[in-house]
Image (cartoon, grey):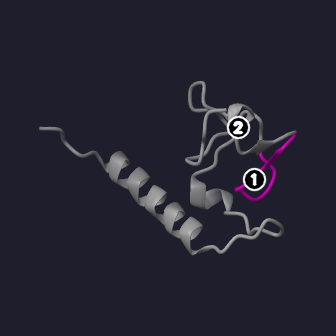
């Protein structure tokens, strides 16, 4: 039987919160509200080979389609989608 770690519970809670925010937001093609960096556990360092510069949501040179604020090409968050 697999044990549940505190980290696993916390990551699941953050992912659930982000999902709730995403579902509750009525986005239009223009002016879509972006999610705060803290809500997606954004950090300026990669997660192994997962980093913003190879994510489908990254907009060169330092932005994201979904996350607010300046985004480092070497950053990472839980919304990462491999390009």
Q: Image height check: is 18 above or below 76?
A: below
Query: Residue at coordinates 70% horizontally, 56% vertically from top-left?
Result: 66
Residue occupied by mark 2: 52
Residue 53 magenta-highlighted: no
Residue occupied by mark 1: 65
Query: Residue at coordinates 63% horizontally, 40% vertically from top-left?
Result: 76
Q: Residue furthest left?
A: 1
SS category of the residue bearing label 2: helix
9 to the left or right of 83: left
Q: What is the span of residues highlighted in magenta in the rendered image?
A: 61-71
Q: Position of residue 6 (x, y in %)?
A: 31, 50
Which of the 4 quarters of the picture holds residue 73?
top right
Q: Main secondary structure of the magenta part?
A: loop
12 to the left or right of 35: left
Nearer the observer: mark 2 or 1; the answer is 1
Q: Image height check: is 42 above or below 19?
A: above
Q: Residue furthest top?
A: 49
Near mark 1 (Cα within 10 A), the count class, few <14, some 14-19 or many ≥20, is: few
Q: Position of residue 9 (x, y in %)?
A: 33, 53
Please report whichever mark, 2 or 1, sits nearer to the chain's N-terminal start. 2
| Disc 2 to disc 1, C-alpha distance | 11 Å
């Amino acid at each position: 039987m697999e044990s549940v770690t505190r980290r696993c519970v916390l990551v699941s809670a953050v992912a659930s919160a982000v999902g709730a925010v995403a579902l509750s937001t009525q986005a239009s093609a223009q002016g879509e509200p972006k999610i705060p960096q803290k809500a997606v556990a954004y950090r300026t360092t990669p997660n192994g080979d997962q980093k913003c510069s190879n994510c489908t949501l990254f907009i060169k040179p330092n932005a994201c389609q979904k996350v607010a604020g300046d985004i480092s090409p070497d950053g990472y968050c839980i919304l990462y989608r491999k390009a």
